[in-house]
Image (tube, grey):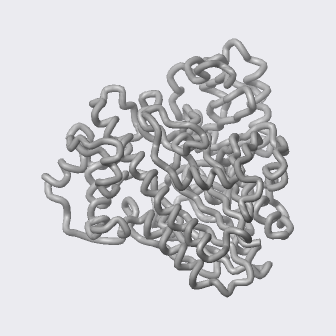
Amino acid sequence: MNIVLVIFDSLRKDCLSAYGAPPWGTVHTPNFDRFAEESVVITRAYPESLPTLPARRAIYTGRRVYPFHEGDFRLKGDFVGAAGWGPIPEDHATLAEVLSEARYRTSLISDVYHMFKPSKNFWRGFHQWTFLRGQEVDSSRSGPRLSQAEIDFWLPKELQNQSTIRFIQRCIVNMRDRVLEEDYLAPRVMQEAARWLEQNRDAERFFLTVESFDPHEPWLVPPHYRDMYMRDEGREQVISIYDDVSGLDPMLTARTRANYSASVTLCDRWFGFFTEALRALGRLDDTLVILTSDHGHSIGDRNYLGKRGYPSSPEVYDIPLLVRFPGAEHGGTRADLCVQHHDIFATVLEAAGVGLPDGTDAISFLDSAARGRSGARDHATVGWGSALTIVTERWWLNCKADGSGVLLHDLTAADPFEANVADQNRAIVDELFGTATRDANGGFPNWILELARGQADAPGCSELAARA
């Protein structure tokens, strides 16, 4: 069986109609929708660790990264994006390495530039890896610098500061030569992936990983995509400020949502191009295709623009996961099973008929998805820096690693995140925190606990401390 893994960065689950619609209205995704109709739609999928690089380390190795025992990185040539923001440890086998040894032809096509920074090694084990340059602040181009008029066009004056100006300078310099839709990076990633399929038709069996940084910010899209959601030629807004936006001009929030929706639709169109290439090459009958995201993004939800681990929220943590079996077998099935990113590792290897290497924490969901079973997990524990989130069928607990700053939400409530019910459910808080501590192999590194002690409590959190 051939296997394709497609990961879109920051793709919200609710932007795929198989899961619903975001608060601001339906996003146009006909190709994702068609793919969902031919797939098993998994309804309770969560990351293992966040954000970008820890998530991919878990996917690629099948090992837990939380609670970051091997995650305190200070590497030249990169910023400290979060706990676990580093390379894959040398003694952790990757999917590409395991499948290459099993005589699969392996390839990585990606524009996620964080994976290719100095000291990173996420391409390890692939027979071919292709890095498409130019996302965000990737140092792919230099000069000429933007004029003040250009800065004012791309960046609202009330959001201008030294950091945001430096960010938008690099982003726009990188995209100056994007004249046609095909020049944008999501189209280029999918075109390159389709080209690889054509060039490797002789492969007896293959494993292809396709990584698109879009729809991650900045939301720079061909104008006709944004026009689908907002035709107003008012002020532009393409960045994420990672802050409260309750005081932001509502038109800028609407513009942000339009640009994000446009980026999702651009990804959808070119994902359709890629799946059509699979179809034209006769590969949809002998290939397992997995589509997912590393995380979502808050775009005005709860008056926040960005993503964060504390307080955590479903629009970031609740991710899409679609599994298309060869020949669209089991298509249209919804599987209400709890899975996490690192389980993709075991699922891919089971599909390939390859045993798990020692030391993995992954549990395959292949059979459960196909048969509509509940799966082996009854909860998901997700780490992000000094904070943890644990989700069960009923409860969502979010707190710092030292047990402070507790937020508990009852998922059976009409609006689960309207109220923090920790004080009324102390025993539940302690039980869930105890489970999260056990998932952390008994405890947290001292440096994570120090981060937790230095982090401010989230508004509305309980004063009680969770205890294992």
Q: Is residue 227 left or right of residue 2?
A: left
Q: Residue at x 13, y 52 (%)?
A: 149
Residue 347, relative to residue 332: is it above or below?
Answer: below
Q: How many marks?
A: 0
Q: At which x and y percent is residue 465?
A: 67, 23
Q: Is residue 176 left or right of residue 270?
A: left
Quadrant of the snapshot with the N terminus? bottom right
Q: At which x and y percent is residue 9?
A: 52, 54
Q: Residue at x 64, y 84 (%)?
A: 201
Q: Quadrant of residue 119?
A: bottom right
Residues 418 and 370: in front is: 370
Q: Residue at x 70, y 46 (%)?
A: 42
Q: Quadrant of residue 171?
A: bottom left
Q: At which x and y percent is residue 378?
A: 81, 37
Q: Residue at x 26, y 66 (%)?
A: 176
Query: Which residue is the extreme one toward the top?
Result: 424
Q: At which x and y percent is residue 114?
A: 49, 62
Quadrant of the snapshot with the C terminus? top right
Residues 10 and 138: in front is: 10
Would residue 274 be seen by someone viewing this image from the given angle?
Answer: yes
